[in-house]
Image (tube, grey):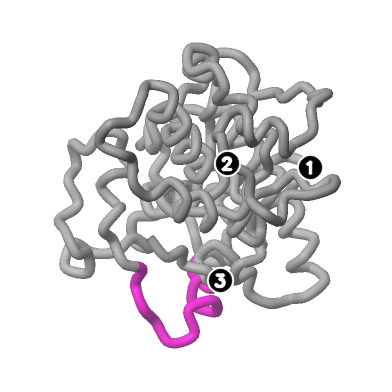
Amino acid sequence: MNPDASLITALVERWRPETSTFHLPCGEITITLEDVVTLSGLAIDGDAVVVDIPDEEWSAICLRLLRRVPYDLVGGVAVVRITWLRVEFSHLPDDASQEVIEQFARAYALSLIGGVLFPDRSGSTVHLQYLLLIEDWERAGGFAWGAAVLSYLYREMGRSTLHISHIGTSLAGDLGGWVALLQFWAWERFPHLAPRDSETRAPATEDAHPRGLRWLSASSRQYGDQLFQYKLWFDAMDTVVVSI
């Protein structure tokens, strides 16, 4: 889905890194671990998502776990393009061995991590450090991915708050982290900002699990000066939905 840059910008303008909360006229509110697991289904309990600095060259790690290395992965470069992953691992052979299946699965997981869960501001590359987290599937399943996603989003919003204060304009594509999660959260907490059922490509189901699924087909509501309109709404905000 395409993020609503105006809604995200209006929200991040009210983010305070000191308290990790959005400041509204009615008080402070934030996206919590409970919100993350409710909206995404990602685990919030488990091992911390931490990567030890490897002794191997990144190209050697890439070759060992994916059996392929992009031509531009040279020197100290430690990132690969998500488009390279999607092109190189687009078709799994019918007679693929278990080893090849795991290589394709890692490539898919790596593109998901870099393109959805922990995207940088470019949204086009992913660091190979994440590949080490999915080397062992059993270990990977024990990580608190949801907690890491929220922590990463907090950090990116803090950085973008500084960007907005200096530039004074819409974030557009200048926010890393899982922006869609933040947008789903806003639609749940502030229902009058959410798309109406008639504005979605598929009906929003109340019993969807995880709850974020109910918004996957939704399209953002369209206004004239959207950023200005969202700012007015947040300036006048006096109620929020406490529980989702």
The amino acid type, in three-letter code, at marker 2 is Arg
Residue 226 drawn in magenta: yes
Secondary structure under the numbered disc 1 in the rendered image? loop
The numbered dot on residue 240 is none
Residue 14 seen in render: no
**Quadrant, the N terminus:** bottom left
Which marked residue is nearer to the observer: mark 2 or mark 3? 2
Q: Residue at x 48, y 43 (%)?
A: 112
Q: Is residue 79 above or below residue 19?
A: below
Question: Which range of residues does the magenta coloring cover?
Answer: 220-233
Binning the other alpha carbons within 10 Å of mark 2 as few (below 14), some (14 to 19) or many (20 upward) gives: some
Give coordinates of residue 49: x percent, y percent: 64, 24
Q: Residue at x 52, y 29 (%)?
A: 146
Secondary structure under the numbered disc 2 in the rendered image? loop
**Quadrant, the C terminus:** top left
Residue 166, quarter of the rendered image = bottom right
Question: Which residue bears the numbered disc 3?
Answer: 231
Q: Earlier in the sequence, mark 2 or mark 3?
A: 2
Q: Is residue 151 above or below residue 234?
A: above
Secondary structure under the numbered disc 3 in the rendered image? helix
The amino acid type, in three-letter code, at marker 3 is Lys
Question: Which residue bears the numbered disc 1?
Answer: 18
The amino acid type, in three-letter code, at marker 1 is Glu
Give coordinates of residue 205: x percent, y percent: 17, 46
Give coordinates of residue 217: x percent, y percent: 26, 58
